[in-house]
Amino acid sequence: MPLSRLSRAALLCGVCLSVPFTAARAEEDGDQTIIVVGQQQHPVEIAPRGLSVSLGEEQFAAVNATNTEDLMKYAPNFFVRTRFPGDSNGVPGFRGTHSSQSARALVMVDGFTVSNFLGNSFGFAPKWGVVGPGEVRQLDIVYGPYSARYAGNSMGGIVNITTRDPERTEAFARVQAMAQPYSQFGTKDSYWGWSGEAGIGLKQKDGPWSLRISGRHFRNDGQPMMFYGLSPVSGSAGTPVTGAVVDPASAALANVPKGSTPPVVPGSANNPFFAAQSPAAITQDQAKLKIGFDDGAVTGQLLFAYWHNEDRQFAPDCYLRDAAGQMKCDGAVNVDGKAYTASGANFAKTLRDEYLLGGKVAVPLGEAWTARATLSTYQIVRSDGFTSAGYDAGRNNLAGTLSAAGPTGWVTGDLSVERRGGPVDVAMGLAGNVYRTDNATYSLANWQSKAGALFATETFGKTRTLSLWGEAVAHLAPAVSVTLGMRYDDWRAFDGGLRRGTVQQRYQNRREDALSPTLTGQVDLADGTRLQLSLAMATRFPTVGELFQGSLTNGQLDPTSFDPNLKPERSSDANFLVSRRFGPLRLTGSVFYQRVSNTIFQFFGVNQSLFFTSNYKNIDLTRQYGLEGIVETKDWPVRGMAIEANAAWIDSRTLRNAANTAAEGVMFPRIPRWRINGSVRQQISARVDGAIGLRYASRPNTDLFGLQRGDSYGFTSELFSLDAKLNWQATDNLRVSAGVNNLTNDRAWVFHPYPQRNFLLEAEWKL
């Protein structure tokens, strides 16, 4: 049973008292846990300005990881919106980044961009699926845009996933089994899954070449993501039914002004639940080829990763029954003498094929200079989303719609030269990218078949950015350095438009530019204290999805569906960090500040033609600041124990919003006031170790105006998850693990439900 709020708070306080919040450290002997701007076992490929952490094997062993992004779940002031194992909508959030602001996170695999900047929402999460968790060697996370090397999409932060390079002839195989007993509203079921991952690595004994080939098959059923409410209508007609579910928590709105009508919330007395969306039957296949070259001077890499993803939803869970006990999920119904319409419990399937292809090379130019070149492309070869026109249509293979994307994807590249070893280290470079989107919708006679598809609408467009950047690190003394950087971006949006039938309308081409300076000063004192102050300005240009998502009404461009003058987001950032070791502890404190003009925010509503729309608008000014504390210790207070924990306090607000001043001064939606993450690992014997992990986030506002706050479906709620894992090294080559996530079965929501208590069994063999 879920813990009461009081019990939860008591347990949280107990964990906090027993796990002091200390800082990450870099061991002098090279042993690595979380690293805060320090030395590590493997090189960090992104510049560690501001708060920076690096996660490796020790952290990974303590995590029940079914997705690659799970490996970061206990990182400081950080989260990934993963709703179930296999979720492809896992948006990362840094500090005060909204859980749908995907365009503020720059994610890379081996330095190649996998962030999906085709849009800016939960539907445009990074492409985590191109890498299996067993292939990850190291995860580096940098908070904020404090290096001129990276685009303004690093406004939230940067994640670089480094995959394994073979050091000899090696192989591995990993299998997982997962289960989740689930109960919510009228849905009670158990969901199961499994995965198999394997790879082989070859390294020339006396040569520069290496090769690594790996693959993964993943299959899981995720819990329902949506619960559908009945729509009230006048009169008393309709089929009498029973089974509708009223959730008292769904109406838990706070701060609703007197005289205002609370919004209709699914699950309330006027909008009772009648069905749950089908469990998401997820099937994924991933294959990867990595070729490396390193002759001691020249290094290079070629990476190809393929990802196939299927999401089949063929079993909506309908709660309503008529007098004969037959299921009713469509049309006019009557509940206790009140008339309603049941709609929305559709059948659906999504099929996607995608690939990443990238190459990079580093060549020495004399004794001090190095030239580097990187080029990559990510292509969505197929993205077909089929949806039925209702429950009965889905069950009987009748009418539906198809949403098809393609060709769509992006190409990125950069060229740089760097000099190290003198009193001033210098780096400069050129970078560029092109993003292309093309999405069409069709009407289908059979919702599962493209046969006879009738074209309905199409949206399309491109953006490109050309950049020039430079950085200089002046070593003023052995313990003092100053880094100055500058970035210039030239951005263009073009070839954008939309089409319905023979009617086509074009967007005007646009061009913007930006100059973004950065400055970092660092001092290492004799007592081991490190002080670092980082300042930056960054510009995040609109994505193709934000610009080219307008809709046509009666053959004309609906002016309420888009903003042709959408402005870039421009931020001013500051971060002060202090870190010091106290015997077996390393403490780090961080203070951060960010002020963003023209924040791009997604609004939802109904236009004058009664069509549901979502569009992006600028908010004049938002601001966030906060405090972070991090702790790490090893072999203390108990030998064999390692503790890593962190706490953050965040204040994120809308300062100015001329379009609707009611939002001014209100906490920005989906940003918690408090976030606490932590992990405790204990070596039990030579071959057995265990771990406990904690994630906590206080309840934020759900909407921009602070009117919607709740702990149920449709809201962003408080999050509390206590996880446990036990590892047994059965032989030198075989490891067996068992774990449970959300041990207390806490119910949490990010509009959609987070997982309830779930279990993982894992076995891994390495040669």
Image: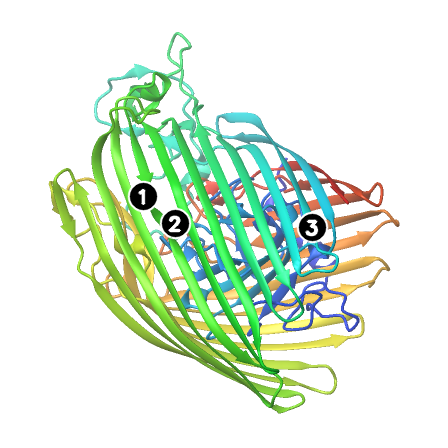
- Using the image, determine if residue 155 lies above or below residue 191: below
Instruction: Measure the C-alpha gap from mark 2 to mark 1.
Output: 9 Å
Tag 2's secondary structure?
loop
Q: What's the mark number on residue 708?
A: 2
Q: Residue at x 49, y 44 (%)?
A: 749
Instruction: Measure the C-alpha gap from mark 1 to mark 3.
Output: 60 Å
Q: Residue at x 73, y 87 (%)?
A: 526
Please name the residue that numbered disc 1 is placed on.
263
Instruction: Say which amino acid is labelled 3.
Output: Leu
Residue in the foreground of this view, choosing between 413 and 256: 413
- Using the image, determine if residue 732 lies above or below residue 644: above
Q: Is residue 323 left or right of residue 650?
A: left
**Outermost residue toward the bottom?**
476
**Outermost residue toward the front?**
206
Residue in the foreground of this view, choosing between 439 and 327: 439
Q: Nearer the viewer, mark 3 or mark 2?
A: 3
Disc 2 vs disc 1: Cβ atoms closer than 8 Å?
Answer: yes
Q: Residue at x 24, y 24 (%)?
A: 452
In x, y percent, where is residue 58? 73, 56
Quarter of the figure that contains the N terminus: top right
Please name the residue that numbered disc 3 is placed on.
202
Instruction: Say which amino acid is labelled 2.
Output: Gln
Q: Nearer the viewer, mark 1 or mark 3?
A: 3
Instruction: Say which amino acid is labelled 1.
Output: Pro
Residue 724 location, quadrant: top right
Answer with mark 2 or mark 1, whichever residue precedes in sequence: 1
